[in-house]
Amino acid sequence: MKPQISPRGRAMPASPIRKLMPLADEAKGRGIHVYHLNIGQPDLETPQALRDRLSHADRVLAYTPSGGTPEYLDALVGYYRGQGIDVESADLIATTGGSEALLFAFFATTSEGDEALVCEPYYTNYNSFATLAGVRLVPLRTRGEDGFHLPPREEWERALTPRTRLVLLCNPNNPTGTVYTREEIERVAAFCRDHGLFLIADEVYREFVYDGGHAISALTLPGFEDQVIVVDSLSKRYSACGIRLGALVTRNREVHQATLRMAQGRLSPPGLAQLAATGIPDVPAGYFASVAAEYQQRRDVLFAGLTGIPGVFLRKPEGAFYFIARLPVDDAEEFARFLLTDFSHQGATVMVAPAAGFYATPGLGRDEVRIAYVLKREDLEQAVAVLAAALPAYRRARGLASRPDAAAEPAEALRIQRPVV
């Protein structure tokens, strides 16, 4: 008799960010250049100060302390204090990327069958982490017309059940690019405090805020020390996705000790990555400002180009380096496949991430895509030209209405209000 995989294994969702990669590889094999707008892989150089540290590696690449090396934790403390966030080494756990920090946070705060409130659209890999932890994501709707800002407190109250254990909030937001105000963050934190919930704040895009704005860290809210768990990562901040290094930050002693025991169970975080991260204090003072300025320019190029295409709708993102765009298509995943299998413009095409995978409610996001502006500006201009040519070609191939904005309106008939993940 053939052995069967577990229900958890069957339930694990495919990534809408990566699942079309075989089609992109086939397009490249046909000689087509693919502009990757589907994934948040920065093309900027990792700071020299981090790369230089790798030349100081020991001759034996040994285990490191489970919670992180003192040198890495000290570098993080200095970084946070430079951001106006007062933490100590005892508040930190080194993790294998922000992904492990999220898993630790889920495992420390929930049991099988518990629920977490999250605003949709949300980072699609939350589905994977929730599935691994046996947690049900209960989404609250946000809308592009409102810039995907948070719903009022009464909507949070309506979503609450006896199984609710936490709120998961990403600020600045992936995939929408929304930056929440202090009032929004305080409102959600107060809701968590009043109901005995944890607030897991995913803050990996903290520096990427534009037009003179700034992100409010949940760690700066006085009186919420027991509620707040911050998930962080070096991947995007220092254009160092491949080192897989992050941190879990909390002043809640019980959560810290629980996650430290989990860290001990997996032995240690990546030693070479922590060595590289000891270069953080030597990163030039103007680094974050220059990086944010570059991404703001890329955002402006892409926003101006896409809003000039008939039927495309999006609000200008305030931070991170993503946005959700509504397209004049009937099925964004089919359009994404069309781009890779049936279309090219001047020898090039574009890869986008269908947005349905960033929602829990069936039907939502079907006419939307997530786009990452992590390519240089000239490439973004070319990508816009490809999309401008591809959209009418797709509509003709599908026999859609000639009026290009007909499919840009939300299809309310597809929107089912009770979400299940």
Image (spheres, grey):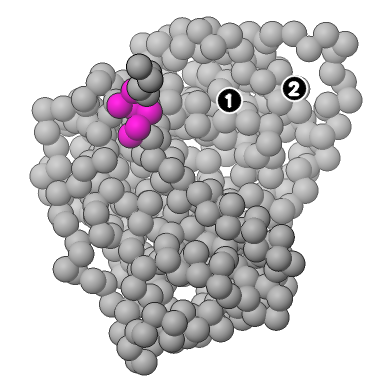
Q: Please state the horizontal and vertical placement of residue 190, each as a whole percent of the image.
A: 23, 37
Q: Quadrant of residue 315?
A: bottom left
Within 10 angstroms of label 1, few (less than 14), some, or many (20 or more) residues? some
Please say whether residue 25 is visible from this viewpoint: yes
Residue 38 in the image: above or below residue 314? above
Q: Earlier in the sequence, mark 2 or mark 1?
A: 1
Label 2, secondary structure: give it.
helix
Residue 96 — which label?
A: 1
Q: Please state the horizontal and vertical placement of residue 271, each as a whole percent of the image.
A: 71, 18
Q: Residue furthest bottom?
A: 402
Examine the residues drawn in magenta and state their main secondary structure: helix
Question: Which residues are the magenta region?
Answer: 6-11
Q: Please state the horizontal and vertical placement of residue 150, each as a whole percent of the image.
A: 29, 53
Task: Name the residue rendered at 54%, 37% in the picture.
Answer: 84
Q: Which residue is mark 2?
A: 272
Label 1, secondary structure: give it.
loop
Within 10 angstroms of label 2, few (less than 14), some, or many (20 or more) residues? some
Residue 16 in the image: above or below residue 335? above
In the shown orientation, is residue 397 left or right of residue 340? left
Q: Magenta stretch containing residue 55, yes or no?
A: no
Q: Please state the horizontal and vertical placement of residue 360, each as a whole percent of the image.
A: 28, 48
* In contact (CB < 8 Å): disc 2 and disc 1: no
